[in-house]
Amino acid sequence: MKKIRKSGLEKVINRHKAECSKIQPIVNTMLETGFCFTTDELKDLASVCSKLYKQAENMAKEESARSKVKFRSNADYTETLEYLNGAVSQNADALRKALLYHTLNPLEIEAYEVTDGVVQVSSRWIEEKDAEYTILPTENREQAQQLVNNVRQAIDELNAFVSHNRFFGKGISTSLDSRRCLCWLDGDGNFHEEKESYEFI
């Protein structure tokens, strides 16, 4: 048995790649605002934003520390923190929208990485997806495939056996076929033998 590649992998990868252009402006905005923004921050932005809110607090503290006047320092801290938290919240909403979190088929945030400020689909994620869409041979799978091949061969031989007999439509058919056959499968996959059909052999 050879490994089997399930369908749909290329579509999934391309679907995620197509959204990079929508996520990049979000990353640009966060960097321009002053945040340290890597792959971890991107994942945080798509989640509860705890790391980014903490980073905003530290940035606000650093900004307010520059003022030597206490009341001005407190005001600077409050204003800066409000501004930074607003940036986090606004861009979090934009990212979740880009990831289609409001739909039944959202994108995976794990698919993306940020390298030097550039968003791209992670090669590691692609490898993981490739493994997910690949069915590897096992002893049981090889046995199952052999049984399927045996059934296929038997069907081909039975159909070939009656192919030149004008009294038959097929050797084996289904419940939807009204032509004469030797056996058939019903809608539940149950096997039925038409014993009276042997008269026409």
Image: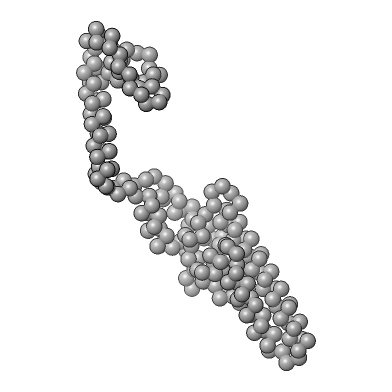
Horizontal side of residue 127 vs 150, given as left or right: right
Horizontal side of residue 120 vs 27, given as left or right: left
Place of residue 90 in the rendered image (x, y in percent of width and height, measured from the top left): 66, 64
Residue at image position (61%, 51%) is 102
Quick check: 95 above or below 177?
Answer: below
Quick check: 43 above or below 60?
Answer: above
Q: Residue furthest top?
A: 199
Residue at image position (38%, 50%) is 133
Quick check: 7 above or below 28?
Answer: above
Q: How many marks?
A: 0
Asked if residue 43 shows in the view, the reply is yes
Location of residue 139 (image quadrant): top left
Horizontal side of residue 79 vs 37, given as left or right: right
Q: Nearer the viewer, residue 53 or 140?
A: 140
Residue at image position (63%, 72%) is 53
Location of residue 176 (image quadrant): top left
Quarter of the image with the N terminus in it: top left
Q: Residue furthest right?
A: 71
Place of residue 201 in the rendered image (x, y in percent of width and height, measured from the top left): 22, 10
Place of residue 68 in the rendered image (x, y in percent of width and height, measured from the top left): 73, 92
Place of residue 92 in the rendered image (x, y in percent of width and height, measured from the top left): 62, 63
Asked if residue 166 shows in the view, the reply is no
Q: Nearer the viewer, residue 199 or 124?
A: 199
Residue at image position (49%, 52%) is 15
